[in-house]
Amino acid sequence: MVMHEAEIIRNIIEEITRLLNNTYLHVAPYQVGIDSRVQAIGECLGVGFDDVRIIGILGMGGMGKTTVAKAIYNEFYDRFEGKSFLEKVREKKQVDLQKQLLSDILKPTKIKVSSVAQGIKVIEKRLGSLKVLVIIDDIDSVEQLEALAIKRDTLPKGIYRAQPMEEEEALELLSWHAFKNTFPNKGYFELARELVGYCRGLPLALQVLGCSLFRRSTENWESTLAKLKEIPCDEIHNLLKISYDRLNDCQKDIFGDISCFFIGMDKNYVTQILDGCGFFAKIGIAVLLERCLVTVNEKNKLMMHDLLRDMGREIERAKSPKYPGKRSRLWHPENVKAVLMTKSVSTLSIWFFAKCMFYKRSICNKLYALNGTEEIEGLVLNLPSLEETSFSTEAFSNMKRLRLLKLNYVQLTGGYKYLSENLRWLCWRGFPLEFIPKNLCQPNIVAINMRYSNLRQVLCNDSETLEKFYIY
């Protein structure tokens, strides 16, 4: 069938009007990989059906959830009687959101809303019979949905999990921002590929770093890559930190412990350890999962995006950039070795200072840090095998808060009485002794891992001490 000229013109006008309509949302300057994601969510929505469809889009910060949501709005809004895009919901009052929703859909009609309860009734009455598209961005509680007349029993039946970009997509997006082209400039390919590897498919990171390296020399790229290995990009760090800042203190502690010590470990095992620390870990980890700050793989292992891991560790490093011993968590081998080998004090007052010149250097070298390590709660040192280097147990004498200790293939000399009674987890693979000394059996410990060790006797001399051990 051949369309009449007038019909063709009308269709063209309608399309142009749609594109020029002020309700059309700006998505992103370079929409790499957006179409396939919109198509996948569109199939879940079932736009042609008459029933209510609610789809939740989940993913860590910077994964492009809002970008995809805007693209979905632009693709489908003209198929509905009404539409509304509610942005940054977390930052707005519920009554204001209700007013915006009603205004977006009923446009010329003026409706007064004086309370959340009244607003819910108005939404149900005025919008209940309409076919509408409503996109709600940045939700962090069920109450925000309930205020918009979305009942708990109609909460999302379908979940779309925003996935990291594939390597080819990531390289293209980075290239658009850094080179204004689909591919890196000559001489930059390997550098671009290394940066893509660092970003791990996170669109936000690709955009921020790509823009910062626009028209920069290869030397600048190399310098940036070297810096990123030590300190995360501030802009990416601050945006990812938004989700972290919403956590309570216990949840922040759980996130910090996982990012520094427990990535790749069994979720149930970690839960037992952190419960022993008084963190209500089952609830806390569930919150981290909801906020997409951690994930659990098919083997029940706790996993975390590399940039979230780096953010967690940067939060810890920033507590004391120059003095690792004043941080609460230590995981970098060089920092840990430096703290364990420290035999000096930062401040020392001695009477009769003039007599100090007669003290032998060998005696002074035996002084251990009297301050600076009180804040340490977790410490990890992984060595490839038992080395000749050993550390004195006296290095732990001031770590009264130490909860988590991992010393794989590490040799200690001296008595274990210096270890904190607050210790909850001890992982010491390659433990060099044939039995567990009594002083090592701290009363509050809940989990111990001594695989690949020389142990012949598993229990301490006091067998009651180990009744609640989770031997792993």
Image (cartoon, grey):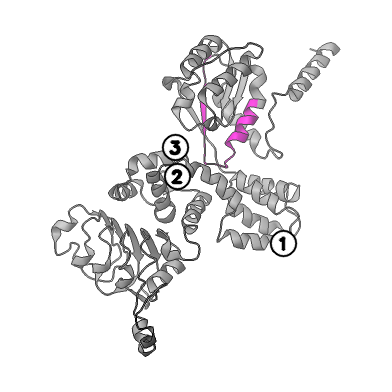
User: Is residue 89 found left or right of 223 in the rendered image?
Assistant: left
| Residue 377 is covered by the magenta coloring | no
For this rendering, which residue is in front, 88 or 13?
A: 88
Q: Which residues are magenta?
A: 51-73
Instruction: Answer with mark 1 or mark 2, whichever residue precedes in sequence.
Output: 1
Whether residue 384 is visible, yes or no, is no
Crowding at mark 2 (Cα within 10 Å: few <14, some 14-19, many 20+): many
Q: Is residue 398 left or right of residue 442?
A: right
Q: Nearer the viewer, residue 344 or 227?
A: 344
The residue identified by callout 3 is 290
Q: CA distance from mark 2 to mark 3?
A: 8 Å
Q: CA distance from mark 1 to mark 3?
A: 40 Å
Q: Which mark is residue 294?
A: 2
In the rendered view, tell whether residue 73 sits above or below residue 421: above
Q: Is residue 52 inside the magenta stretch?
A: yes
Label 3 secondary element? helix
Image quadrant occupied by the N terminus:
top right
Residue in the picture at 28% in, 67% down: 453
Q: Residue drawn 45% across and 67% down?
A: 335
Kindly give the residue lying farthest to the bottom in the view shown: 358
Amino acid carrying mark 2 in the image: Val
Which quarter of the figure is the C terminus placed in?
Answer: bottom left
Q: Position of residue 289 (x, y in %)?
A: 43, 40
Residue type highlighted by circle 3: Glu
Instruction: State which quadrant residue 215 falls in.
Output: bottom right
In the rendered image, residue 470, in percent from the top left (x then y), is placed at 25, 53
Tell me, for residue 367, which label it has, or none: none
Q: Which residue is mark 1?
A: 218
